[in-house]
Amino acid sequence: MKISMPILGPRALWEKTARWESMGSELLKVRDRHETEMCLQPTAEEMCTHVVAQLPPLKKRMFPLLLYQTTEKFRDEMNPRFGLLRSRQFLMKDLYSFDLTKEDAAKTYSKVCRVYDRILRDRLGLEVYKVVAQSGVYGGSVSHEYHLPNPLEEDGIHFCSKCGTGITKEGGSHKCECGDSAEVKTFSTVEVAHTFQLGTKYSKAFDALTRDKQPLEMCCFGIGVSRLLPAIVSLMSSEKAIRLPPLIAPFSAAVVVTKNLMDNVITELTLSSLDRRLSGGILLDDRVEENVGKRIKHLREIGIPRIVVLGKTTEGTINKVPMVEYFPPQQHCDEDESKEWTLSQVMQSIG
């Protein structure tokens, strides 16, 4: 269920879990005109559990109860830097789950972690590392972080490429089942997602109970949306061009048209064919007074994954079988090869 929690959280709510003090100076605190203390919430475990506790006892078939939001969060970073990678205000997708038993909560945790794996690895195609992490002030018994390689960041992981397990640097040295044959590498990374099995820490504090008066088992999950984008740009791009996964590119494709073909039926056919095949929007580059090469360069710089050029090649074949110049998604930023194909071949390559 999609929700939207308040940005402001009252002190009384955060004191119930002792996090008003334990969060330390990272918690941005404010006072209203009545001197009531509140915070700009960096996360919503307290608020969300408080809301669930106000509900009448839920029936068994209503579990697991999953509540999620994508909202602005705030944290008083000691050293904000690198733009959106580490900032005081950030956009986060956070999800909170409630289950009747510890076993059910573990199943929910595994399911959501698999969804995170699919989002980051399969949908976005990222080289992401899931590692064991410390729960810190969040509490709970199990915690994992998802990291992307990033030489600029101070985060880091120890990761065994042989068994595929790892741990954050702050968690100490990595000991896995591989023993002496472990192939552990240590490298700088940036954290882009975090998951927790919280247990009953919050449900006990707020009396969020089952029908049998037992505290609900809780998990929470978060993806740093505004951090994920610069982390991807840093990982996949070069000084010459931004390279983004097609799923989050500003447009799925761009069509570059020369002046002679602006009003030709081939332009409309190309746009409509791409629009039917791709879901992320098609950009028509009609800057006909500018050089085609410069336009292609600019489109790559802003992260357009596919470019179809209706230029000299098309003009020369317009009365036969029209050919276009097609720039497919780049595998590497410094390699950008085009193909002279028919529009049908372009559509087939897109799939």
Image (tube, rainbow, N blue to C red):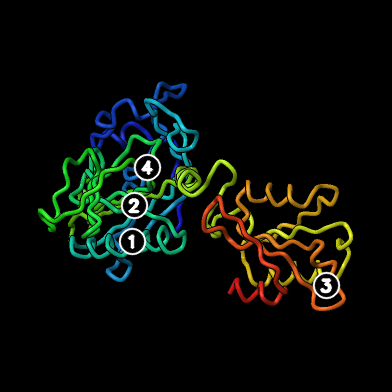
Q: Nearer the viewer, mark 2 or mark 3?
A: 3
- Which mark identifies residue 112? 1
> CB under 8 Å between callouts 2 and 1?
yes
Q: Position of residue 214 (x, y in %)?
A: 17, 57
Of all residues shown, which one is farthest toward the left? Answer: 180
* Alpha-carbon span between mark 4 and mark 1: 21 Å
Name the element at disc 2. strand
- At numbered mark 4, what does the secondary structure look like: helix, strand or loop? strand
Q: Residue at label 3?
A: 317
Q: Which residue was labeled with disc 2?
A: 221
Q: Earlier in the sequence, mark 4 or mark 1?
A: 1
Q: Is residue 327 above or below residue 71?
A: below
Circle number at residue 190: 4
Residues at marks 3 and 4, CA–CA distance in whole angstroms: 49 Å
Number of numbered discs present?
4
Q: Kindly state the secondary structure of the residue where label 1 is placed.
A: helix
